[in-house]
Amino acid sequence: MNYWTKLSIEYAEQKSYLDDLFQVYPTIPEGIRDIDNDSWKSIQEAFNRKDNVKLVNELLKIDLFPIKDSYIAYLKRDKSAIERNPKTINRISGRLYDMGLNQIYKKCSEPKETNRQIGPMFKRWLHKKSLGIMPVSIQKLALLTKYSIFP
């Protein structure tokens, strides 16, 4: 078993593991996301007029798209794909109409999931010198382990 994996497992078996982990990853749910009033009005208008292209375009402008769909990330990156893929836009729009405006608003304003917050938390914790030492770069750590400074 990898040395670091073994150390991690041993540490996780301690009573205070979750308490200590919370110091590194304070995953407290954030408040609801704000939706700009002008943006919401445009979404409502497109929804009421059944303008699929405008509805999807307007929803892509806000932080959280209200439905999980594999193609949403692609549409966010390539706005011209909306015009080129009318069947996909109609399929997505159909799901949005089935939800209704209240549910769309609710989904768009949900707080960020805690698992989406933890990415930068370890680096922030490490740079606070919480271990009492300066962080070591990955390259230096690789050299240290290569020359058996660590078991």
Image: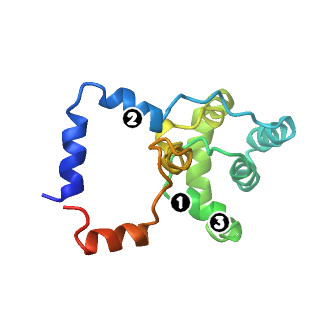
Q: Which residue is mark 2?
A: 21
Q: How is the image coloured?
A: rainbow
Closer to the N terminus: mark 2 or mark 1?
2
Label 3 element class = helix
The disc at residue 71 is: 1
Label 1 element class = loop
Farthest-out residue, right: 38
Label 2 element class = helix
The disc at residue 38 is: none
Q: Are marks 3 and 1 in contact (CB under 8 Å)?
A: no
Depth check, mark 2 against mark 1: the one in front is 2
Q: Residue at x 68, y 34 (%)?
A: 33
Closer to the N terminus: mark 2 or mark 3?
2
Q: Residue 98 vs residue 23: left or right?
A: right
Q: Nearer the viewer, residue 83 or 66?
A: 66
Q: Nearer the viewer, residue 69 or 50?
A: 69
The local crowd at label 3, few if under 14, some if 14 to 19, many if 20 or more residues have their Cα within 10 Å, is few
Q: Nearer the viewer, residue 108 or 2?
A: 2
The disc at residue 77 is: 3
Give coordinates of residue 122: x percent, y percent. 48, 47
**In 3D space, how far apart are the residues under numbered discs 2 and 3 (Cα atoms)?**
35 Å
The local crowd at label 2, few if under 14, some if 14 to 19, many if 20 or more residues have their Cα within 10 Å, is few
Depth check, mark 3 against mark 1: the one in front is 3
Quadrant housing residue 65: top right
Which amino acid type is shown beneath numbered disc 1? Tyr
Q: Residue at x 62, y 48 (%)?
A: 93
Which amino acid type is shown beneath numbered disc 2? Leu
